[in-house]
Image (tube, rainbow, N blue to C red):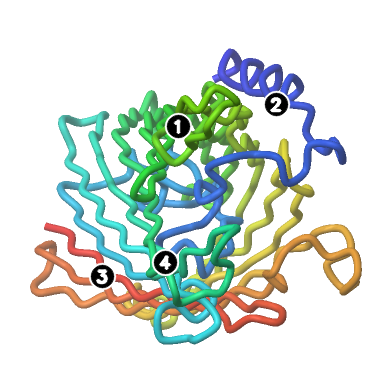
Amino acid sequence: MTVMVLMMTVLVDNSQAGNDNRRGTAGATELLINPWARSSSWGGVNTACTRGIDAFFSNIAGLSFVEKREFVYTNTMLYGGRSGLRSGASINSFGFAIRLGDASVLGAYVMAMGVGDLPITTVDSPEPGSNGTFSPSLMNLNVAFAYSFTNAIHGGGNIKVITESTDNVSATGVAIDAGIQYQTGENDELKFGISLKNIGPAISFGGTGMSFTVTNAAGNNMTVEYRNAEMELPTCLNIGGSYDFYFEKWNQKLTVAANFTSNAFLRDIFGVGAEYSVLDRFHVRGAYLYQTDIFDGDKRTTANSGLHLGASVDIPFKTDGPQLSIDYSYRTAVNLRGTHAVGATFKF
């Protein structure tokens, strides 16, 4: 565990987190969007206490808590989504995990993001609607392995393949995530977590859309390609902790969590959140994420206003048998409609 922490610290130092000159220059920033309904209502502050497939975003070490098999689907309507008129962006995510033994879990998930139909405009025909439309798509494929070293220490790693494309331009990249979790206390109520995400080589776009044909002085046609700049991946480091308060009546539990996110290409984020559950069946959550100048309209660098809310209902089919969970989350935004996510988790 010590080796992993030291490695993560060195890597994030090399990423120059907090450098103003680097903000907004990363590529594949969809990797920073939480595609899961349950954990997005936490705002991602559950680095220490995330469990199951939701751990793919917050801290991959939490995948080690899958009991048998788990399947999750979530649909996210980003800033209003296709029906929101303000944004055509929507995300569909599918994840599956299976326990391989007493200590290991294997998981995979795919996130497919579309931004709707956008008008094609050219220098000669700049008016939208006269040249048809195009539909960019973004997809991430993930395969992860998590392992419980002891009852207190859990770790995991994730390999992801990133693709972004339109009809004639595309980019492909590869990245890895790593994370650890530590829990202690009579009921494992105190938890700590650290995760490093999106470590990989720079990506760049290519394809026929990056070239054009010109006629030289001799009357010959020539194909000229644009010079493409490489884009670094949006590396980030999460450090978090949580504590569970148990109440005997109705099997109540209150979990409070805090998290710090060090972004290499965005402003750092401080977050706090809480989850209250009754009978281990009904859950409500809320979180708030703070960035520098988030209240200043002239200096704000994010559309998100910081507040995250959500709820879940767990429906068991029989004792110690299959269970279905329905999850919902809402993320507030400035000058845009909020982001809604609805998901279902099936454990069997």
Q: Nearer the viewer, residue 233 or 218?
A: 218
Quickly name the residue at label 3: 344
What is the crowding at mark 3: few (fewer than 14 residues within 10 Å), some, or many (at least 20)? many
- Return the mark for residue 206: 1
On the question of residue 248 being in view, the answer is: no
Residue 283's image quarter?
bottom left
Q: Residue furthest top?
A: 3
The kind of secondary structure element at disc 3 is: strand
- Residue 294 is situated, as x and y percent measured from the top left of the image, at 83, 67
The kind of secondary structure element at disc 1 is: loop
Quickly name the residue at label 4: 38
Name the quarter where the N terminus is drawn.
top right
Q: Earlier in the sequence, mark 1 or mark 3?
A: 1
Q: Earlier in the sequence, mark 1 or mark 4?
A: 4
The kind of secondary structure element at disc 4 is: helix
Give the distance between the C-alpha atoms of the residues marked 3 and 4, in whole angstroms. Answer: 9 Å
What is the crowding at mark 1: few (fewer than 14 residues within 10 Å), some, or many (at least 20)? some
Q: Nearer the viewer, residue 89 or 305?
A: 89
Q: Earlier in the sequence, mark 2 or mark 4?
A: 2
Give the distance between the C-alpha atoms of the residues marked 1 and 3, in whole angstroms. Answer: 37 Å
What is the crowding at mark 4: few (fewer than 14 residues within 10 Å), some, or many (at least 20)? many
The kind of secondary structure element at disc 2 is: helix
Q: Is residue 230 left or right of residue 270?
A: left
- Which amino acid, mark 3? Ala
Residue at 39%, 33% (x, y): give it: 151
